[in-house]
């Protein structure tokens, strides 16, 4: 259950970005300044690279399921490609959210109480994404099981899984983008050591 009530218009499914009052630091540090800023330390660079990996891998998995649905790949090579990557994706994304909820968000909220609402929005996203991940895990397992069943069932399951993954990617993209908009400018303003994470 959500620890804080987030209005519907700020839910992951509805919003088009964070409200302006949470983006004052982003106006000071626009995205194009991030890569070369001296305060973007090793931890922040690693964290951003994980976000890129999650976006890319989710797209790759959706594409693989789509290929199976369009009969452009056989069942055996599909299983060898899809199963370990899907498992890795689900495990790593859950672990990523646990670290953010347990360590990073509390440190950032303590350092900058004016952004607390932003972190509550992101925590709410994690709860939504967690439920979505459970559904994705089920869809992935059902698809791997369907590889041994008849042709039509396999194609239907592949299409359903591809659709689930593409939908998930939309929400994930929104979440990662907003999370970066809130956190990276704060890191550039204060430095990693100043936020207690460096
Ligand atoms: Fe997150
Ligand atoms: Fe994240």
Image (cartoon, grey):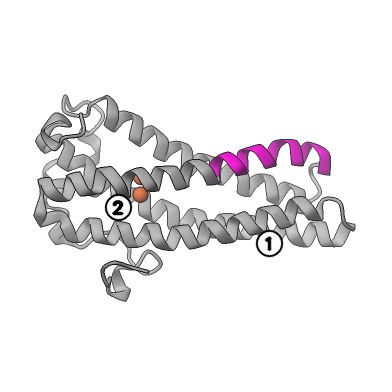
Q: Residues within 10 Å of mark 2 (few under 14, many from 20)?
A: many
Q: Which residue is drawn at 52% across and 43% down?
A: 91
Looking at the image, residue 91 sits to the left or right of residue 99; the answer is right
Residue displayed at 27% across by 24% down: 42
Q: In which quarter of the image is residue 20?
A: bottom left
Q: Name the residue under label 1.
A: 160
Q: Which quadrant would the C terminus be assigned to in this image? A: top left
Residue 94 sits inside the magenta stretch: no
Vertical comparison of 184 with 125: above or below: above
Tell me residue 70's x, y (percent): 77, 52
Task: Tally the numbered discs.
Answer: 2
Residue 84 within the magenta-colored segment of the rendering = yes
Q: Can residue 74 be seen by looking at this rendering?
A: no
Residue 2 picture location, percent across and down: 33, 68
As drawn, 66 above or below 48: below
Which secondary structure class fits the magenta region best? helix
Magenta-colored span: 74-89
Label 2 residue SS: helix
């Amino acid at each position: 259950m959500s620890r804080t009530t987030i209005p519907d218009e700020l839910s992951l499914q509805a919003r088009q970005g964070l409200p302006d009052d949470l983006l004052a630091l982003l106006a000071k540090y626009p995205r194009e300044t991030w890569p070369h800023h001296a305060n973007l330390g090793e931890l922040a660079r690693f964290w951003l690279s994980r976000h890129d990996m999650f976006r890319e891998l989710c797209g790759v998995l959706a594409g693989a399921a789509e290929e199976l649905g369009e009969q452009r790949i056989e069942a055996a090579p599909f299983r060898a490609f899809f199963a370990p990557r899907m498992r890795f994706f689900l495990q790593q994304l859950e672990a990523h959210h646990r670290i953010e909820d347990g360590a990073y968000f509390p440190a950032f909220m303590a350092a900058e109480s004016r952004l607390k609402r932003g972190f509550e929005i992101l925590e709410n996203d994690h709860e939504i994404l967690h439920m979505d991940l459970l559904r994705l895990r089920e869809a992935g397992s059902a698809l791997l099981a369907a590889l041994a069943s008849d042709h039509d069932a396999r194609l239907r399951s592949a299409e359903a899984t591809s659709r689930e993954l593409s939908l998930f990617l939309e929400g994930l993209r929104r979440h990662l983008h907003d999370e970066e908009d809130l956190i990276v400018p704060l890191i550039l303003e204060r430095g990693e050591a100043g936020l207690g994470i460096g």
